[in-house]
Amino acid sequence: MVMTQSLVEGDGFAVFDLRLDGAGRDWSPPERADGYGVVFVRSGCFRRLSEGIESLLDATSLYFAAPGREQRVRHTHEGGARCTSITLAPELAEPLFAERPPATAVFTPPFVDLEHRRLLALAHRSPDDVDASDVLALVATVVPESGAARRRRGSDARRRIVDAVRERLTADPRTGLLTLARHVSVSPYHLSRIFAAETGQTRQSGALGVQTIAPSSMNAWLKTPAPVAGTSRAAARRSWSRRS
């Protein structure tokens, strides 16, 4: 069951707060999108099947809706999930995409997570102050990530290992590298290498972002040095140089 709260409705866009209750472990009935959208996962974990591609979604990822695209979801953990859904009219969405957005999950770097949470906070605090430019600026930051997701998609075996780690971290974000490596029966070095290759999350890329109010468990596990909220990306880059 999905509970939807409308936060903002503007000219050609809308922002919603979604709560997935997590009941049941079977695939949901197919749902067909009637327009463009982006769904950011804020907490929880679930699987999504769309256009024959099965993806794991957690708080480090998002997915795209596209006209006519079908999806089904299956919950893998108790407690459900919380998401932010942004819908866009074709005249706003189509100029952003050079091609149809991918059906797979897209990993989000820390600075995108911060911008998402800033928009969400503004939508809750002062919805009349949210306009199309705020929404489009956020969506524009994830379009390059969608291209990277297409290029990074690796082997099924590698993806299964990384998915198992992400599910374990959703259940217990404090789980350490050695425990995670034993959980998926690989060496810590191999796990670190394939995790970075599959998600695109590295210490260097994480350092360019900023720490949010609720940092993702992935970045904590990778021990990404992150400046405090409000620090500019340039300052973050300087901070990383001093640490190296």
Image (cartoon, rainbow, N blue to C red):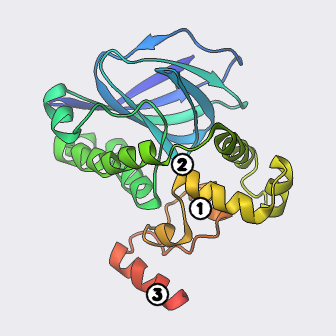
Label 2 to label 1: alpha-carbon separation: 9 Å
Amino acid carrying label 2: it is Thr
- Please give the name of the residue rendered at 42% of the width and 78% of the height, measured from the top-left corner: 236
- Please give the name of the residue rendered at 17% of the width and 29% of the height, measured from the top-left corner: 12
Circle nearer the N terminus (3, 2): 2
What residue does disc 2 label? 60
Dot 3: element: helix
Residue at the extreme front: 155
Q: Viewed as shown, does residue 117 lie left or right of 179?
A: left
What residue does disc 3 label? 241
Task: Please state which of residues 68 and 185 is positioned toward the viewer in this rendering.
Answer: 185
Label 3 to label 2: alpha-carbon separation: 25 Å
Amino acid carrying label 1: it is Asn
Query: Is the C-beta separation of discs 2 and 1 under 8 Å?
Result: yes
- Please give the name of the residue rendered at 22% of the width and 39% of the height, measured from the top-left corner: 98
Dot 2: element: loop
Quadrant where the C terminus sits is bottom right
Circle 1 residues within 10 Å: few <14, some 14–19, many ≥20: many
